[in-house]
Amino acid sequence: MNEIKKFPYTYILGWSVSRYDRFSSCKRQYFYDYYAKYDKENPLEKIVFLKGLTSKALETGNIVHDVIRDTLQRFQKSSKPINKDKFFKYAFNTTEKYCGAKTFFEHYYNGDLISVQDIYLKVKNILEKFLNSPRFSWIEKNAVPQSSGWVIEPPGFGETRINNYKAFCKVDFLFPVGDKIYIMDWKTGKADDIKHSKQLTGYSLWANYHFEKKASDIVPMVAYLYPEYKERNIKINDASIFEFANTVESETKDMYEYLIDIEKNIPKDKKEFPVACNAFFCKYCNYKEICRASKF
Ligand code: SF4
């Protein structure tokens, strides 16, 4: 496969599914996430600390992703089957390490005690579903022989260009089998058809841009690992790619509206980023301590 293309650094903002998702949910939260250094009311360290809060669900997904990533990288060095004892020991050590290094939202705001053991039990349960899935055996049999062509969470943020706009589409796992390229994205949370289709179409465009593959040769799929292993194939064709590229362009322009300098990515004043009128968002928002709009 071709090399992943690199781009010279620019300050201009880059579209991503998660960035636009945040922008759509609450503009104020979006401001804290992406423009903290422009806030005149709160110390930068405070905002950075709140941004770094994790949650039990988020961290579970994070650990599962990283253990799967490391397992796939191990297959690139050796095609020997996984030793399950070592695999789960590694998963436990990773859980202990990650949980020890982070502050949990549930602890910070509610005083809950965080049990590494409880988090590990869920991590283990999810990883067992991954190892026992037909897809895992299929990968071992069909994809491992071509593991030198695998792309596993590539370094950086998966930068690409869509309709000449900067965009970030970072794939979990991309691998060739025969003349097709498969793209898999692991999910430990709930299915979200619209968001996940958008994400996978973005990854397909990333593959199309970097590896010059036709849409018909790309097989994108979402792998839901919990509560049961389930896959969802995302259909892409020239029409869906065209529609997606237009969406990226219009969503990028929406976000540009909140800037005073697009090239330098300098935001308007914080007061131009309205607070969400949504109790659910506020209840689970990392910034509720410093946001006057929050009553939770
Ligand atoms: S507390 Fe609510 S209004 Fe304030 S930033 Fe968070 S989600 Fe937005």
Image: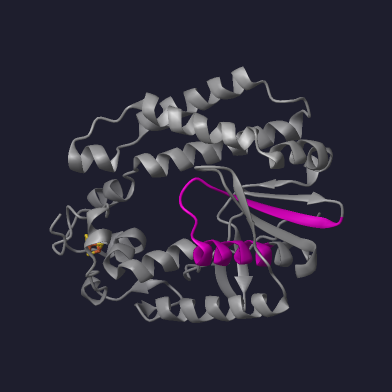
Left or right of residue 264: residue 27: left
Camera-side residue of 76 and 125: 125
Which residue ends up furthest to the right in the rendered image?
178
x and y percentages locating residue 167 in the rendered image: 55, 67
Q: Nearer the viewer, residue 157 or 265?
A: 157
Q: Residue at x 47, y 67 (%)?
A: 11
Q: Quadrant of residue 77?
A: top right
Residue 111 placement, left or right of 192:
left
Say whether residue 135 is left or right of residue 149: left
Ligand 1 quarter of the rendering: bottom left
- Chain part drawn in magenta: 179-206
Q: Position of residue 172 (x, y in %)?
A: 61, 49
In percent of width and height, residue 13 lies at: 47, 69
Q: Residue at x 57, y 65 (%)?
A: 197
- Residue 266, visible in the rendered structure: yes
Based on the displayed image, in which of its 4 quarters is residue 219 positioned?
bottom right
- Could you tell me how many numbered marks the image carries? 0
Extreme residue toward the front, this view: 228
Residue 164 in view here:
no
Q: From the top left corner, tell me how far across and down residue 161 is, in percent.
A: 62, 71
Magenta stretch containing residue 196, yes or no? yes
Above or below, 67 against 236 in this view is: above
The answer to whether residue 9 is left or right of residue 137 is: left
Foreground residue among 16 and 125: 125
Residue 28 magenta-highlighted? no
Q: State the residue in front, 183 or 124.
A: 124
Quadrant where the image shows the C terminus: bottom left
Residue 92 drawn above or below residue 173: above
Quadrant of image for the N terminus: bottom right
